[in-house]
Image: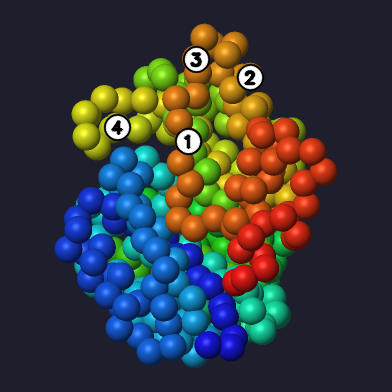
Amino acid sequence: MAQIIESIPNISEGRRTDVIEACVDQIRTTPGCTLLNYSSDESHNRTVITYIGDAKGVEEASVKLVKKAAELIDLTKHEGEHPRMGAVDVMPFLAIKDCTTEDCVELSKVVGARIADEAGVPVFLYEYSATRPERQNLVKIRKGQFEGMAEKVQEPDWEPDFGGRKIHPTAGVMAVGARPPLVAYNLNLNTDDVQVAKNIAKIIREKDGGLKCVKAMGFDIEDEATGKKYAQVSINMTNYEQTPLYRVTELVKAEAARYGVVVTGTEIIGLCPMKALVDSAEYYLQIKDFDFHTQVLENHIL
């Protein structure tokens, strides 16, 4: 495989194993495409799928996934902590090897047009693929969620890029676009007061004056094994080199301490670039004069 493009779509199903497997099977059975990982969360009622391939393989797998998800996921009956507007909520493309961001932008346009035509799901282009400045930010596109989207797409500035001023009656709309790598990172707190997590999220996220390249929300989560509830600060690190994982971790710990709360554990959803983890190891281990490029074994043999 010479060219490698990565896609990390999020589907609005994290509870029904048969539906999740049927969707993931669309990736498994597509030539030129390799499934890397998928991870489901029952509280969020969401599954993150990661796959790679050449442009043609990723295109076919992505369209098949949306068609299957639209068939099996009904958002009129969907409940979960995470905001959502589509059966497949978001579908990003990342340039990994022998391709460019521009290639991924073009792929997003091809895939978006096919999804609207073949699955009947209207598509907004976002991030690097956005056709309007306000559509670069996924949060702005998703505002109103599935329940408010039929009305939103009638507004002058919010016609989808593909599919017209309508929504799929059960699968909603979705966002497709090219973007840089991000780390989906959650910090769990030893409190069931979700307001604490929401307050911390507001402090740390960029749009409210916090850390650069950090998007954050506070959620009320129920442990799948015990049924016990806890608050979670859920973060998208959109550039882990500008704001590394350890910096946001330490800020969350400091803010939590103000409420007499501690971080009990963290989660990484889906795949994570190795350097994001190594940077945190270097920080916490206080390694002197560490060089990622020359002192990491895998950099010499992979």
Secondary structure at badge 4 equals: strand
Q: Quick check: marks 2 and 1 in contact, CB under 8 Å?
A: no
Secondary structure at badge 1 equals: strand
- Using the numbered discs, state the Cα–Cα distance from disc 3 to disc 2 in whole angstroms: 9 Å
How busy is the neighbourhood of tag 2: few (under 14 within 10 Å), some, or many (20 plus)? some
Which residue does the numbered mark 4 point to in the structure image?
Answer: 222
Asked which quadrant contains residue 281, the reply is top right
- Using the numbered discs, state the Cα–Cα distance from disc 2 to disc 1 in whole angstroms: 15 Å
How busy is the neighbourhood of tag 1: few (under 14 within 10 Å), some, or many (20 plus)? some
Q: Viewer-proximal residue, 247 or 21?
A: 247
Q: Viewer-proximal residue, 114 or 204?
A: 204
Sequence-wise, the earlier of marks 1 and 3 is 3
Sequence-wise, the earlier of marks 3 and 2 is 2
Which mark is nearer the camera, 4 or 1?
1
Which mark is nearer the camera, 2 or 4?
2
Residue 40 x %, y %: 32, 52
**Amino acid at pointer 2:** Ala
Secondary structure at badge 3 equals: loop
Q: Quick check: marks 4 and 1 in contact, CB under 8 Å?
A: no
Which residue does the numbered mark 1 point to in the structure image?
Answer: 266
The residue depicted at 35 percent of the width and 33 percent of the height is 221
The residue depicted at 75 percent of the width and 59 percent of the height is 294
Give the residue furthest to the left: 18
Residue 27 x %, y %: 35, 77
